[in-house]
Image (spheres, rainbow, N blue to C red):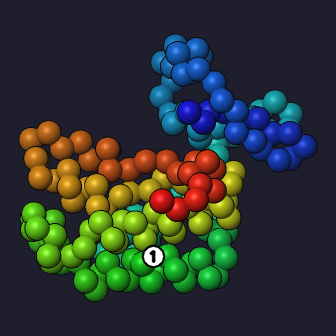
Amino acid sequence: MAGLVPATNGSPQTKQYDSNLDARTRAGVSYPRSSLSLGGLGSWKRVPSVHIVADYGTDGYRLDADAVGAFPISDSLRARLAAWNDAFERACPPDAYEDITGKRFDFVAFAALGLEIAKAVKRELPHWRVLYWDEGLDWFLARDPRHQDRARAEYEITLKDAFAPPR
């Protein structure tokens, strides 16, 4: 699991660690494990985070408060992300989640395309925390609302994920 990101000559790198030894957990501090980096002078700062999520009235992403300023991705990737979100707005009616056959909207294909876009975002922003909201998984998990944990539909895209060959 990715953890603290130590800065080396201004270039943060991912460090692996045992979560059982995480001092922040023992101290009762609550924030995502991979949301911190060590600045050049030993000071801690938060790593910017972005959520890749299709939603009505958005551009396909949501920046956390840690991400100050603009979302620094290429224009071509920004266009892909916007087109992906626009396809969701146009083709996915809100009641499509109730359709267990998936005939109203192809959540699985849509989620696969979104995952590729999230991986591209991670490749362009390797020092950012990139979280992906999987609409296909969300649609599937909605089958049993008594046991639905919406947090299971969102997961972090790591560098290993971003550079893995497509399946």
Given residues 29 and 7, the one toward you in this image is: 7
Residue to which mark 1 is pinned? 59
Report if residue 68 is visible in the image: no
**Residue 135 at x, y percent in the picture:** 31, 62
Choose top left, top right, bottom left or bottom right for residue 124. bottom right
Reply above or below: 142 against 14. Answer: below
**Residue 161 at x, y percent in the picture:** 56, 51
Q: Residue furthest right?
A: 9
Choose top left, top right, bottom left or bottom right for residue 85. bottom left
Which quadrant would the N terminus be assigned to in this image? top right
Q: In the displayed structure, does residue 154 sit left or right of residue 29?
A: left
Q: Residue at x 27, y 68 (%)?
A: 107
Q: Residue at x 52, y 62 (%)?
A: 166
**Residue 77 at x, y percent in the picture:** 59, 77
Q: In the displayed structure, does residue 49 sit left or right of residue 59?
A: right
Q: Secondary structure at mark 1?
A: loop
Q: Of the residues shown, which amino acid type is indicated by label 1? A: Asp
Q: Residue at x 48, y 59 (%)?
A: 167
Please rate how many residues cluster around mark 1, counting C-alpha atoms within 10 Å: few if below 14, some from 14 to 19, many from 20. some
Q: Residue at x 32, y 78 (%)?
A: 88
